[in-house]
Image: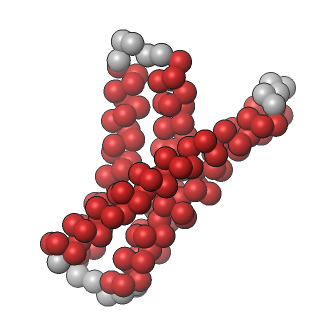
């Protein structure tokens, strides 16, 4: 088991990416120069928000009762674990759209794959910063 201060730092680090995502979407919405590219990026970010909430809640639940090394290992595994959470809303949205009579092509179900490299790079940067901050503070 880890101390309350250490747990608080890790939980805060877990929820900060959600705040950043929300600020990015809000910034795009209030900007006057919203372009198609920005809208597509916002679309990707919006699907990431519910996915990240579910991911963070499940990670908080899995953090209970773990020792320090198990939690740090889980931090490094986080970006890979997040991918299915991110893929599910995309696929469900496209399948629902397809069943509602708006076929958008079968390949559109896999749009989320375009974001996987970004998810992994950003995820491992955040994981690295989290572990570095944790090791520096504690």
Query: Which residue is depicted at the point 38% across and 38% down?
Result: 22
Image coordinates of residue 62 in percent, x first then y, are 47, 75
Image coordinates of residue 39 in percent, x first then y, are 51, 23
Image coordinates of residue 65 in percent, x first then y, are 40, 84
Q: Quadrant of residue 47?
A: top right
Please determine whether, in this image, residue 46 is positioned above or below residue 16. Answer: above
Q: Is residue 63 in view?
A: yes
Task: Give the farthest residue toward the left.
Answer: 137
Q: Quadrant of the C terminus?
A: bottom left
Query: Which residue is depicted at the point 74% across and 40% down?
Result: 109
- Colouring mode (rainbow / by chain / secondary structure / one colour): secondary structure
Query: Which residue is depicted at the point 66% across and 39% down?
Result: 111
Query: Which residue is depicted at the point 43% across and 70% down?
Result: 76
Using residue 25 as the reference point, say whether residue 103 is left or right of it. Answer: right
State the count of labels.
Answer: 0
Please determine whether, in this image, residue 58 is positioned above or below residue 91. Answer: below
Task: Give the farthest residue toward the top.
Answer: 32
Please determine whether, in this image, residue 3 is positioned above or below residue 15. Answer: below
Image coordinates of residue 96 in percent, x first then y, are 76, 37
Using residue 103 as the reference point, say whether residue 71 is left or right of it. Answer: left
The residue lying toward the viewer, choosing from 65 and 86, is: 86
Q: Quadrant of the N terminus?
A: bottom left
Q: Is residue 14 in view?
A: no
């Amino acid at each position: 088991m880890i101390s309350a201060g250490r747990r608080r730092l890790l939980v805060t680090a877990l929820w900060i990416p959600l705040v950043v995502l929300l600020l990015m979407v809000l910034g795009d919405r209030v900007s006057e120069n919203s372009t198609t590219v920005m809208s597509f990026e916002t679309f990707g970010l919006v699907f990431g928000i519910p996915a990240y909430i579910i991911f963070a809640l499940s990670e908080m639940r899995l953090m209970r009762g773990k020792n320090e090394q198990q939690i740090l290992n889980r931090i490094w595994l986080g970006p890979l674990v997040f991918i299915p959470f991110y893929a599910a809303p995309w696929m469900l949205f496209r399948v629902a759209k397809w069943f509602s009579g708006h076929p958008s092509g079968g390949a559109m179900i896999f749009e989320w794959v375009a974001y996987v490299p970004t998810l992994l790079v950003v995820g491992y940067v955040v994981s690295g910063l989290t572990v570095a901050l944790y090791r520096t503070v504690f």
